[in-house]
Image (cartoon, rainbow, N blue to C red):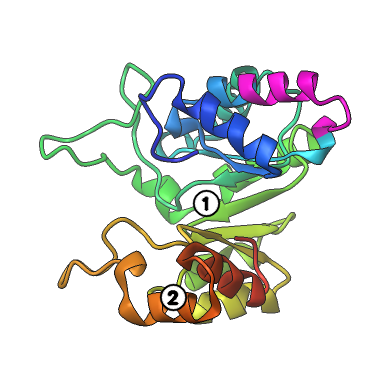
């Protein structure tokens, strides 16, 4: 549900279409500010389709950078649950390994350059943040916990002290950014990689402006097999064994 912030009604429509088409995994985040619409779409779909149960739909959401203090992690989840109108989340992720200060509007605090004001202590030491995640997992409010955008060194550090290891690391993965070493590390440590932007990010090669969807080789492969490029890219990720 990324990139639909501010487009009122669009998230609801998109989720309704996705669920009716057969999608059952919804990847959300507190920062996208559209959990209310997503939750409404889920509830309406379940009412209209009694054969589909809540447990048939896998919902992921994430805690944003400025909510890394333990009490804020818990607030973030409870606020997401309230937004969704649900009593549990299937997967709860730490969106980024970088903690930021928050302003008086409960949003990330910005400096004079418009950049996040980094909270150094929680960026260097993830134990308090992850400890809160572990508590929420043990309470049953989330069925699984994980991270997003974490590097191999950050993952190694966490695995050396965590009580509940992350079950997922969601990162950008596609043919222009295969992340081979990170994917292998996750598999070797029984952590499931999950790919975001599997069809390519908006501006993948800044030096040339080339995008995954305009790459001649990839498009030729798709055309040769009589498939769309999206089908080829999704199949590429699935064949590698992770969540797409």
Badge 1 is on which residue?
A: 126
Number of numbered discs on residues: 2
Which disc is residue 172 wearing?
A: none
Residue 190's spot in the image, x, y percent? Answer: 73, 70
Residue 208's spot in the image, x, y percent? Answer: 16, 72
Q: Is residue 126 above or below residue 15?
A: below
Q: Is residue 217 left or right of residue 146?
A: left
Q: Nearer the viewer, residue 50 or 164?
A: 50
Residue 213's spot in the image, x, y percent? Answer: 35, 65
Residue 76's spot in the image, x, y percent? Answer: 55, 28
Q: Is residue 230 above or below residue 93?
A: below
Q: In the rendered structure, does residue 37 fall within the stretch colored magenta?
A: no
In the displayed orientation, state which residue is furthest to the left.
Answer: 112
Badge 2 is on which residue?
A: 175
Callout 2: SS: loop
Q: Nearer the viewer, mark 2 or mark 1?
A: 2
Locate residue 187: give its quadrant: bottom right
Q: Is residue 205 above or below residue 10?
A: below
Res. 156 visible in picture = no
In the displayed orientation, state which residue is furthest to the right.
Answer: 51
Q: Where the C terminus falls, by quadrant?
A: bottom right
- Give the Cα distance between marks 2 and 1: 31 Å
- Residue in the picture at 55% in, 65% down: 231
How many residues crowd mark 1 within 10 Å: few (<14), some (14–19), many (20+)?
Answer: some
Q: Nearer the viewer, residue 116 or 192?
A: 192
- Residue in the picture at 60% in, 70% down: 235
- Residue in the picture at 57% in, 53% down: 147
Q: Earlier in the sequence, mark 2 or mark 1?
A: 1
- Residue in the picture at 63% in, 52% down: 146
Q: Is residue 6 left or right of residue 222?
A: left
Which range is magenta?
40-54
Callout 1: SS: loop
């Amino acid at each position: 549900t990324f990139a639909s912030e501010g487009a009122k009604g669009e998230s609801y429509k998109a989720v309704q279409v996705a669920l009716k088409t057969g999608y059952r995994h919804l990847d959300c985040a507190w920062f996208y500010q559209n959990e209310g619409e997503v939750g409404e779409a889920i509830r309406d779909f379940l009412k209209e389709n009694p054969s589909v149960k809540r447990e048939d739909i896998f919902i992921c959401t994430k805690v944003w950078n400025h909510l890394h203090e333990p009490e804020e992690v818990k607030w973030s989840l409870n606020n997401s649950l309230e937004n969704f109108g649900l009593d549990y989340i299937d997967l709860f992720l730490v969106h980024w390994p970088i903690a930021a200060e928050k302003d008086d509007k409960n949003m990330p605090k910005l400096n004079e350059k418009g950049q996040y004001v980094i909270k150094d202590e929680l960026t260097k030491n993830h134990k308090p943040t992850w400890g809160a995640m572990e508590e929420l997992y043990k309470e049953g409010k989330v069925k699984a916990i994980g991270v997003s955008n974490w590097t191999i060194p950050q993952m190694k550090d966490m695995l050396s002290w965590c009580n509940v290891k992350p079950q997922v690391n969601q990162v950008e993965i596609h043919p222009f950014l295969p992340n081979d070493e990170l994917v292998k590390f996750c598999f070797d440590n029984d952590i499931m990689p999950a790919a975001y932007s599997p069809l390519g990010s908006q501006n993948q090669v800044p030096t040339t402006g080339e995008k995954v969807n305009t790459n001649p080789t990839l498009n030729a492969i798709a055309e040769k097999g009589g498939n769309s490029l999206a089908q080829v890219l999704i199949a590429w990720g699935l064949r590698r064994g992770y969540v797409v």
